[in-house]
Amino acid sequence: MSNKKILDEFPDVIQANEDLTQKQKDVLIASIRLFAEQGYANTSTRQIAEAAHQSEGTMFKHFKSKANILRAALEPIIHEIIPDVEAEFKRETLTHPAANLHEFLDFFVRNRMAFAANNQDAIKVFFSELLYNETLRTEFIETARQELIAAFKDTILLLQKNKVIIDWPFNEIFRYMIAVVVGYILDRYVLFPNRAWDDDVEAGYLVAELEKVLQP
């Protein structure tokens, strides 16, 4: 199962960006950690500046506002880290061939659930901005869509060839599968995180729901 952590990769990606000054890098690395720990709304610019070991005035010269800091932090996650994460998923998919529809759906659901559990801090940061920022949301959806399509389109087409999944256009199958899994992740980690969740039971429900619709 996928065990990459988005926020663990973030400092290295930021440090490798030659277009940023070291002070800008320090702000972004400090801010994303604080946003994940405390939430975007509960993190003050003063806290970010202190964690980055600089004054608020210096920080604002570069970013102008807390919202701009978050947007600048999300850009490399969307364009560099997410593709790397999905490339890992593609490698796992290729090494886990599906013998039937249930096996494929069970792997897909549990793999994405494990990834979400391992990255719930990043998910909370993402949704605080992506829900309200149309530009970033569009960029994220398009990037994630391209990477996920590359990750398992061949598997879907093979299952269709073997007549073990419904003969819908790939985009329809993709959209339905993503909607079901993302709906769970949103409930689990953003809307109702304190509910008594049994993830193994939830995985069974998700697989059953997908299998009922996608069987030929």
Image: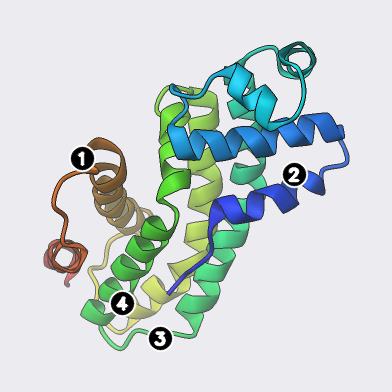
Q: CA distance from mark 1 to mark 4?
A: 28 Å
Q: Give the total number of marks visible in the rendering.
A: 4
Which is more N-terminal, label 2 or label 4?
2
The answer to whether 111 appears left or right of 100 in the picture is right
Closest to the observer: 92 or 127? 127
Q: CA distance from mark 4 to mark 3?
A: 8 Å
Q: Which part of the image, by quadrant, shows the C terminus?
A: bottom left
Q: Which residue has dot 2 on it?
A: 14
Which is more N-terminal, label 3 or label 2?
2
Q: Which residue has dot 3 on it?
A: 97
Contact between labelled residues 2 and 1, with CB atoms less than 8 Å apart: no
Q: Which part of the image, by quadrant, shows the N terminus?
A: bottom left
Q: CA distance from mark 1 to mark 2?
A: 32 Å
The answer to whether 207 appears left or right of 61 in the picture is left
Residue 122 place in picture, x, y as percent: 48, 45
Question: In percent of the image, x 21 and y 63: which residue is there?
Answer: 199
- Residue 174 sits above or below residue 125 on the image: below
> Looking at the picture, which amino acid does disc 3 mark?
Pro
> Looking at the picture, which amino acid does disc 4 mark?
Phe
Which is more N-terminal, label 4 or label 1?
4
